[in-house]
Image (cartoon, helix red, strand yellow):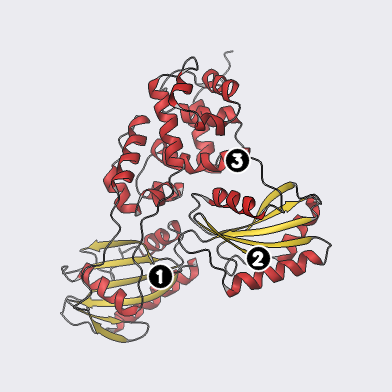
Amino acid sequence: MPTENPHKDHRGRLRRRFLSAGLSDFAPHNVLELLLFYAIPRRDTNPLAHALLDRFGTVDAVLSAGEEELCAVAGVGERTARLLRTVAAASAFDACLPRPRFSDAEALGSFFCDLLSPLEEGLAVAYLGNDFGLLSHRVLAGVDPHSPHTSVAALVGEGLLLSAPMCAVAHVHRDGLALPTTADLDLSRTWKGAMTASGVRLLESYIVSGDTYTTLLRRHSGKRSPTAGPLALPTPTEAERSLLASLSGAAGLALKTEELLGRYGGLKRLLSASAARHRYEGLDERETALLLLPYALHAYRMSERPVPAAQEREALGAHLADWYHGRAVEEVVLLLFDREGRHLATSSVGVGSVSEAALSCRRIAERALFSGASLSVMAHNHPEGVAAPSAEDRSATEAVRGALSAIGITFLGQYIVAGRDVAFIS
């Protein structure tokens, strides 16, 4: 009786494994195989992956090699070398387009007037970060927000895919008056309930009619600011367009470069978006995996590099800046070291800012104790903010210091990372 071919759908299985769990449990040759699939559509890529590792030693070294060095390995042609160099360039990309921020409810009201005043009927949603910066927005022209066919769940779901902590909604009044009806107030309560249950705060709900608006939560009326002008949305740079087009071409795909950069708000936000977000935007499995690979590869390369000693504050700060590169959400990590300062382990202890991550000092103490650590530091990132410690950051530092001190582990302090800028709370 014939046995099933164990290599059947190897590419699909490896790609789906990556999409569901990332690269952390991948062997180095599997990481390179996954990448080489795009340059070599049909041939077995396993021997070439091993040949590259035999020549360079690590995935990090392969992606650091120049085109001439890569082409010196038997089986690496110009297309394969170009793919490896392009993915390496994308994984290092760190420029983030500035996103517009709203100073108050009036600024949001003016924004919704710009979006909705040309429409007879429609709905708009603005998804915002903790700094009131615009993560994304959506306009649904011709949609009646009161219709049972209007999916609140879909728009709430988009907020979750964007990791948006808050949002604001608005809809058009066709009668020319921005005055709330009983149905509008009921709709606002429905929105607020659905958002709150999902962990996305509804900042405000607006009615728009021409250049006037009314807020339903605060019951405030206003007019679009005549001096504000249309909100300046991020415009992709030529460098972003060129790099994404090169990545798409080297992988043999036909990504809609301009559309994707505009929809996601630039290349860095596109490359750091989740698989769920890409699926929501209609990208297929191969396209999604390609867009996730650059920053996943960066994280894998970091895992191959040694962590500086606990006492080397400047070097450890630079390492953490590299480690957080490409991460779109705030994450709190605990780094554990032995008595001489040698790195033992890095453990994620919360997602979100230190105030949002519901840090468990007990869990932190348990992880430190079980690792056999004598020294420790904590770190978290501000993905699009500044590396300035807040009162919550300082309070969390002292709470963790107290918990670890109680079990005889020295806590050296907390790093705060924003891009290449690093602050330290001792």
Say what secondary structure mark 2 lies in. loop
Q: Amino acid at mark 2?
A: Leu
Query: Taking 187 as reference, is 255 above or below it?
Result: above
- Residue at (51, 22) in percent of width and height: 8
Q: Position of residue 109 (x, y in %)?
A: 28, 76
- What separation in Å lies between label 2 and label 3 (alpha carbons)? 24 Å
In the picture, measured across the screen, residue 368 lies left or right of residue 21, that is: right
Nearest the eye: 53 or 306? 306
Q: For the residues carrying marks 1 and 2, which lies nearer the camera in this image?
A: 1
Q: Is the residue marked by circle 2 packed among few (<14), some (14-19), or many (20+) residues within 10 Å? A: some
Residue 24 numbered tag: 3
Nearest the eye: 327 or 173? 327
Q: Tags 1 and 2 in contact by the CB under 8 Å rule? A: no
Tell me if I can see residue 280 in this picture: yes
- Residue at (60, 49) in percent of width and height: 319
Q: Position of residue 82 (x, y in %)?
A: 39, 28
Name the residue carrying label 2.
359
Name the residue carrying label 1.
132
Tell me if I can see residue 39 in this picture: no
Residue 50's image quarter? Answer: top right
